[in-house]
Amino acid sequence: MNRLGTVIGFTFRNKVRTKSFVITTLLLALVMTIGIHVPFFIQLFQGGDEAAGNKIGIAAGGQTEIAQQIENYVAELPDNDMEFVPLEGEAAAELNKQAAEQDLKGYLKIAPGTDGAFPAVQYVSEGGSVPTDVQAVLQPALESAKTRFITAGALSDEQIAQLTTPVLLGASSYDETSGTGAAGADEDKFNPMNFITVYVLMTLFFFSAMLTGNMIASEVTSEKSSRVMEILITSVSPLTQMFGKVIGVFLVGLLQIAVFGVTIAVNLMLPYNRDVLAGFDLDFSQMPYDVLIYGLIFYVLGYFLYALLYAAVGSIVSRTEDLGQAVTPLTMLSLAAFYIGIFSLSNTDSLLMKISSFVPFTSPTTMIARIGLGEIAFWEIAVSLVLLLASIFFFGWLSAKIYRTGVLMYGKRPSFKELRKAMKAYKI
């Protein structure tokens, strides 16, 4: 145990002190910082639009009642920050001059309709297009005004509000319609925090499996190619080396994740970024802790499954130049696990997802998605965990035999037949 701790400590310190680790970590942290500040930079360089805010001009053109109905509708919207400024006159040049002087984002021009039709409404701006946020607010306001215009007092305000409110199409399973399902289960599953948690955990697993796995394989191969391995095995057994490297690199990965987490948290807590974050209407009190706990369990178990295989592959490669080709099958497996999960987030109950959640190489991502965004029974989670644990023990045993024999096999990469013969000499 003491020697295992020594190998873990040596691997951790050796990796953390390397220039490649420091530069890569700082570079990725810098990229994350820049990415988080992109919305602020855009607002900073769009000086005119920011100054204008959401001030919209409105040229009634004699249609004061309709203009007032639009203003009243928008004023009653929750979290509304749009402000209407009345403009005088009807000539385009005069209206454009007023909009420029008052630094407006744009203005609505209402022209009387022909033959009793609803007036024509046009949005005029410097860019000649309607911004998405303005469109989302003005479109229902105009529909409400048009309904009032057509009904001409025949309907009450409540009836008009019902006409202009979109119909929400709900969804439920057969079990819920028969009364056997859990009430409110669908609402909880489609919580935005569930989606964010699942997406982050899946991405975290993919990059951890790729980066730390390649890190383990490259370290084993470099030690073997430089003949340092021959010195190491005289003092520490190959098995202790393998498990020590896997755990040591795992701690290095956790340190890197912690650095990225702190970087993201610090940048999001800045005042201007806090306002942008508030616009997404995220409620961190609704954090799905069950999804988070299950996700971390599958993340850790999935990491060790891939890490042990990367260590085994690294031990049979004598030159670092051949390492990329050797780890290609493992890379393809991790890519398959990531893409199956990420492209099935909208359909987590598909047959592909159900089968993949019981396959140890893909379950660390697909099972997270099913737990967070789908309907799943506890026995399915338990069976998937048992299969994953059994796979770790089996491939750990297999990797240990490969590692023990592979670290001292030089020259060309051994064939499966040669490797099998060499493995028979050792009993683990």
Image: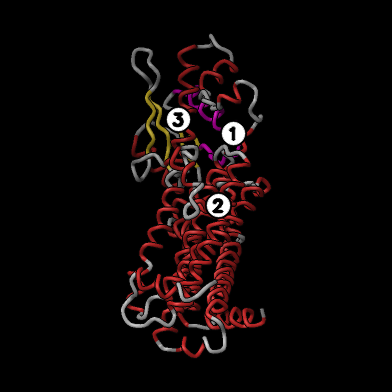
Query: For numbered disc 3, what is the local secondary structure?
Result: helix
Q: Give yes or no for contact between labels 3 and 2 (Cβ–Cβ under 8 Å).
A: no
Q: Position of residue 137 (x, y in %)?
A: 49, 34
Q: Quadrant of residue 390?
A: bottom right
- Which residue corresponds to mark 2? 387
Query: Bounds of the magenta span?
Result: 63-84
Label 3 and label 2: CA atoms lie apart by: 53 Å
Dot placed on the residue nearer the N-terminal end, 3 or 2 = 3
| Residue 80 in sight in this render | yes
Classify mark 2: helix, strand or loop: helix
Q: Number of labelled discs?
A: 3
Q: Residues within 10 Å of mark 1 (few under 14, many from 20)?
A: some
Residue closest to the eye, 385 or 336: 385
Chain-order first, disc 1 or disc 3:
3
Q: Quadrant of the C terminus?
A: bottom right
Res 193 visible:
no
Nearer the observer, disc 3 or disc 2? 2
Residue 201, position as x, y percentages in the image: 54, 55
Q: Of helix, strand and loop, which one carries label 1?
A: helix
- Residue at 50% from the left image edge and 61% from the top image edge: 37
Toward the viewer: 398 or 8?
398
Residue topped by disc 3? 139
First along the sequence among labels 1 and 2: 1
Q: Which amino acid type is shown beneath numbered disc 1? A: Asp
Q: Is residue 221 magenta?
A: no
Mark 1 and 3 residues: CB-CB less than 8 Å, in contact?
A: no
